[in-house]
């Protein structure tokens, strides 16, 4: 099996603070993500699911344990692990087009090839008409679409998505989920997607990993066998509802224990 | 009926928008008031013209100094000092401030010293400058530099420090290296605010000009002002003050244009 695009989380532990105030945020998390797999991580807020993505991205260090991407141990951030953040992180001084070509331009991709690539991704996220706009002139949903295009245009092995639609209204969120499903059908990148929205998790994922409340541990690992291509109508199917009930039960235990 | 606000309502709404014509009229009224009070006080003879010149005397003085070219020599002498002092300061403060705001170690090393120096009154250092540098243009430039640099440095460091961490993180996940982030991300992100800082501190450079020239100079607007005081030529003092204000206003506008030109995205 090729290692490219694999993600291996090995006994990762994370603690915050010092002495009396020391908090255990992640407690011995381990799981494997196969290349081209869309894995969704859900859990109560504060369970450390976002921290796990930040560790995989190399943006924060695990206290112990390690993460391997494409078989290589993560020691620092790198372009092989693209990330879409919950907050808006487009470079405000660059136009939409310049944002999307940021990665390819860094790598020294020649202009004709780069322009074709950017055109393709702008078309894919439906923002061709906004190529020369600055981020300030876009809505929240449009900015996240550019962020997805920007991450994909850099051709990462793995795409990490930290509640990318969390700040959007529900209407826009649905549009974005549909768009992400379509884009993913084309790219089949390995995706690790964090959310607290169970419908979103089932709709998008090949697999949903449920984490416990703090300290975050692996609670359940549920395969989602709903056939692709999917669209949001599946949310009314009995299979979907059965999966939702199962995940809700797993999560309910966590939330009840908390109170 | 539409809820169109009356003018009075828009004037009394916190942060409310007003028509641009209203803004212009309001500014003109205030200027007219100031000039009017001056005209009444001077032409009306309420204040002796030894202390307050009549407005046309200031204009006539301006014309007579301009006609033999000496006015422009003095203006250029002052502009040169301000620009040199300011540029010298900005050229060091922008990169150093960027490093201070980006790297904790640079901040830890420099901040205590810089904060100590920036609260020293520049005037208290002038005797030292004269002793060390003499009374040439170097002394005047140094006064401007000391008046501007240390606060400018701290303000630019603050702007660099305020750049969103997620913006830097996003750039890492697109392949930017740690040592590249400062110039590829933090600098462009902070640039509009850095230009604002330069605009504000340019104003300080003008305020330190007279201090620089009062002490030791043989040309410049502060210098002719001082000379005029000895000769009771209050119209020349007024002329110098007004020209300094006008030059400050022009440099302020120049920085606004620079910001719009360099950072169209931040409009």
Image: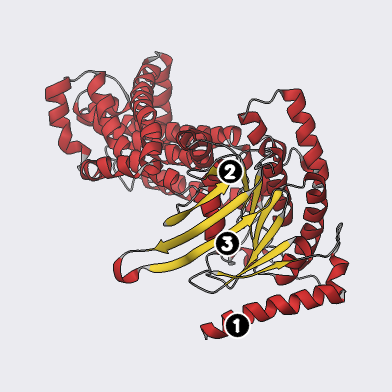
Say if mark 3 contacts mark 2, CB within 8 Å.
no
Chain letter for mark 3, please: B
The CA distance from mark 3 to mark 1 is 49 Å
Which residue is labeled 2 in the image?
A71
The numbered disc on residue B15 is 3
The numbered disc on residue A253 is 1
Q: Residue at x 41, y 31 (%)?
A: B243
Mark 3: which secondary structure?
loop
Is there any visible trace of residue B147 in the rendered image?
yes
Q: Residue at x 15, y 38 (%)?
A: B124
Q: Is the N terminus of chain A in the top left, top right, bottom left or bottom right quadrant?
A: top right
Q: State which quadrant residue A42 falls in.
A: bottom right
For residue B56, side relative to residue A128 (left or right): left
- Residue B15 x, y percent position in the rendering: 57, 61
Whichever of labels 2 and 1 marks the residue nearer the N terminus, that label is: 2
For residue A89, side relative to residue B177 (left or right): right
Foreground tag (3 vs 1): 1
């Amino acid at each position: 099996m090729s290692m490219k695009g694999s993600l291996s989380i090995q006994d990762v532990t994370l603690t915050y603070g010092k002495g009396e105030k020391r908090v255990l945020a992640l407690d011995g998390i381990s799981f494997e993500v196969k290349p081209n797999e869309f894995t969704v991580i859900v859990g109560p807020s504060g369970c450390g699911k976002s921290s796990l993505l930040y560790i995989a991205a190399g943006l924060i260090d695990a206290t112990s344990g390690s993460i391997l991407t494409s078989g290589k141990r993560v020691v620092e951030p790198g372009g092989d692990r693209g990330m879409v953040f919950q907050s808006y992180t487009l470079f405000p001084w660059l136009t939409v087009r310049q944002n999307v070509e940021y990665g390819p331009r860094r790598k020294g991709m020649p202009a004709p090839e780069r322009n074709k690539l950017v055109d393709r991704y702008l078309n894919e996220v439906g923002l061709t008409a906004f190529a020369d706009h600055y981020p300030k002139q876009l809505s929240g949903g449009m900015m996240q679409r550019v962020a997805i295009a920007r991450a994909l245009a850099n051709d990462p092995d793995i795409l990490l998505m930290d509640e990318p639609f969390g700040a959007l209204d529900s209407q826009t969120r649905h549009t974005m989920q549909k768009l992400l499903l379509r884009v993913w059908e084309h790219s089949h990148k390995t995706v690790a997607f964090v959310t607290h929205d169970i419908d979103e998790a089932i709709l998008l994922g090949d697999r949903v990993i449920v984490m416990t409340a703090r300290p975050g541990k692996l609670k359940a690992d549920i395969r989602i066998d709903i056939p692709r291509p999917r669209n949001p109508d599946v949310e009314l199917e009995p299979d979907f509802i059965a999966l939702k009930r199962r995940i809700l039960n797993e999560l309910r235990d966590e939330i009840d224990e908390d109170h | 009926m539409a809820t169109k606000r009356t003018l009075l309502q828009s004037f009394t709404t916190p942060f409310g928008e007003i028509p641009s014509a209203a803004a212009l009229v309001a500014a003109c009224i205030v200027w007219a008031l100031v000039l009017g009070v001056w005209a009444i006080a001077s032409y009306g003879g309420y204040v002796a013209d030894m202390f307050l010149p009549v407005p046309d005397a200031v204009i006539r003085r301006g014309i007579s100094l301009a006609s033999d070219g000496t006015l422009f020599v003095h203006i250029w002498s002052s502009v040169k000092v301000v620009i040199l002092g300011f540029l010298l300061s900005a050229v060091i403060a922008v990169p150093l401030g960027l490093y201070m705001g980006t790297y904790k170690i640079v901040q830890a090393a420099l901040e205590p010293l810089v904060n100590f120096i920036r609260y020293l009154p520049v005037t208290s250092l002038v005797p030292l400058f004269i002793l060390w540098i003499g009374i040439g243009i170097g002394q005047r430039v140094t006064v401007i530099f000391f008046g501007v640099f240390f606060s400018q440095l701290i303000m630019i460091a603050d702007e660099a420090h305020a750049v969103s961490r997620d913006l830097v993180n996003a750039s890492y996940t697109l392949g930017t290296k740690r040592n590249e982030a400062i110039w590829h991300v933090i600098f462009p992100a902070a640039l509009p605010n850095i230009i604002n800082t330069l605009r504000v501190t340019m104003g300080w450079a003008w305020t330190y000009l007279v201090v620089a020239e009062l002490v030791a100079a043989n040309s410049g607007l502060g210098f002719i002002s001082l000379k005029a005081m000895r000769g009771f030529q209050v119209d020349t003092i007024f002329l110098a003050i007004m020209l300094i204000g006008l030059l400050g206003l022009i440099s302020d506008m120049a920085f606004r244009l620079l910001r719009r030109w360099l950072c169209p995205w931040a409009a």
